[in-house]
Image (cartoon, rainbow, N blue to C red):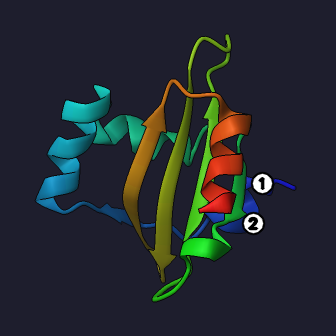
Amino acid sequence: MGSSRTEIFEDIQNFEWDKGNLTKNWVRHNVRYSECEEVFFNEPYIAEEDAVHSVKEKRFYIKQRSSNNDWSMIICYSCINSSCSIFSIFHNVDINGLVYTIKKM
């Protein structure tokens, strides 16, 4: 079940990007880091814990479709205090199929 932004993201003050992730998402997916950040502030979306990959820290993923359903994005991330780190993105994907894959990994 999804949660509203007010429950999960109200404390986010900034996003931390390492140099590799800034360029990786553009090269692999043609997605700018600012587009990834926007997903957290545009509803509707679904945010859930990624229990399988939450070994060293709690990780989550957020799923969102565009308003006209012509693309979808899943972002894997963690938040510590008011800072959020994005690890991976999946752009233009079958949201239901990818979530199943993430949960099985």
**Residue positioned most to the bottom:** 56
What is the number of callouts on the image?
2
Q: Position of residue 12 (x, y in %)?
A: 49, 66
Mark 1 = which residue? 4
Q: Is residue 77 left or right of residue 14?
A: right
**Residue positioned most to the front:** 104
Picture layout, residue 72 above or below residue 67: below
Residue 43 in sight from this viewpoint? no
- Could you tell me the amino acid type at mark 2? Glu
Name the foreground residue: 39 vs 48.
Answer: 48
Mark 2 = which residue? 7
Q: Residue at x 26, y 33 (%)?
A: 28
Picture layout, residue 65 above or below residue 51: above
Q: Residue at x 57, y 45 (%)?
A: 41
Q: CB under 8 Å between callouts 2 and 1?
A: yes
Residue 5 in sight from this viewpoint? yes
Q: Residue at x 48, y 71 (%)?
A: 78
- Could you tell me the amino acid type at mark 1? Ser
Q: Residue at x 56, y 19 (%)?
A: 71
